[in-house]
Image: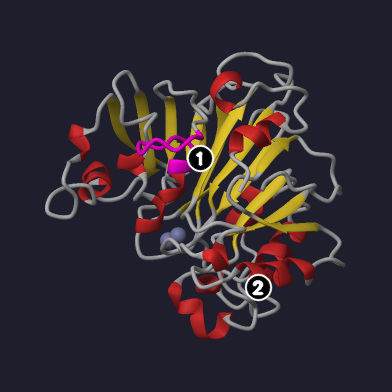
Amino acid sequence: MTPLVQQYAEGTGGATGVGGGLGRRSSWHTVPVRIVVCGVRGSTPAPGGEFVRYGGHTSCLAIAHDGEVPSLVIDAGTGIRRASDMFGAAVDLFGGRPMDGTILLGHLHWDHIQGLPFFAAGNTAGSHVEVYSPVQAATEEALKGFMSPPYFPISAGELLGTWTFLGIEEGAHEIGGFSVVAREIPHSPGRTFGYRISDGGATVAYLSDHCPTELGPGRDGLGEIHDAALELALGCDVLFHDAQYTDDELPARARFGHASCGYAVALGQAANAGEVVLFHHDPGRVDDEIDAIVASYAGADIAVSAAAEGDVLDLPRRRGARRARRRA
Ligand SMILES: [Zn+2]
Ligand SMILES: [Zn+2]
């Protein structure tokens, strides 16, 4: 696969690469918001040749604005190693420097938190990382609990740098230089938030884990197009949405707490989103199957694509434009 550093150099007017270019203003500094897709898989990682084109890491997006290093990371699945890897992978969106920013978690299931201790830009001297997760009983303890002996060799308190673990409530917030709206969405057990992230000119909606059938079947049996989901997605440039199942698989698997591809597209249409990016792929969904799912929406009246590790999305986007994928 093409390393991210090369992807940044492509089509961006001469960026000098992730390590050298993100940290300083370069010829692409006019890009208002840049999203780097670092992990796309749901539930558990999916290594192997059948998954290599879309990727096997679990959920993570890195978001930067105005050519800076990312100030906001959404979810900390194993994909966070593609943002900055303590095992020394070539790609480092932070240019080898400590993170000064926020990790925003939609919820605390394994596939959204397991990358935290392996995130080099955070787990290093000089970092200042705020980690937000939905407020619930003993929020900080819940967030730290997964990372403690005997389940893991170090505790959250032993991470290098400065880490602060905080709860976030529904509503409007200013985080990482972005306006963030948080709304609770059905995906039990535990609280799960979807987010709407905007810099005032570009907006991305992120509903990675979402079980709308918990609220009823909706018009087509795929789940309710409910107010919280509509509020998050309304008029957004890009909607990242749970697409773990096909519509045919949903009846047998809805109890696992996820949505179908058809629901993701229907929500995007109802909310007048600019583009739907199918996300949180089932760990058993091989590349060719994802290709077929995307192809099935070729005639849809909304652009539909599937998230792949290494995708780079620059916002705002020209509405209605089919995405020219930039990745390996
Ligand atoms: Zn998940
Ligand atoms: Zn989940």
Check the image and name the residue furthest to the top: 25
Residue 182, image x, y percentages: 51, 44
Residue 266, image x, y percentages: 73, 65
Q: Residues within 10 Å of mark 2 (few under 14, many from 20)?
A: few
Residue 216, image x, y percentages: 56, 76
Q: Main secondary structure of the magenta part?
A: loop
1 or 2: tag closer to the N-terminus? 1
Residue 262, image x, y percentages: 69, 71
How far separated are the C-alphas under marks 1 and 2?
37 Å
> Is 87 colored magenta in this rendering?
yes
In the displayed structure, 127 sits above or below 277; it is: above
Range of residues picked out in magenta: 81-91
Residue occupying image coordinates x 80% and y 47%: 324
> Is 130 colored magenta in this rendering?
no
Residue occupying image coordinates x 38% and y 38%: 132
Residue 289 - label? 2
- In the drawing, does residue 263 fall left or right of residue 142? right
The residue lying toward the viewer, choosing from 116 and 273, is 116
Residue at the spot of label 1: 171
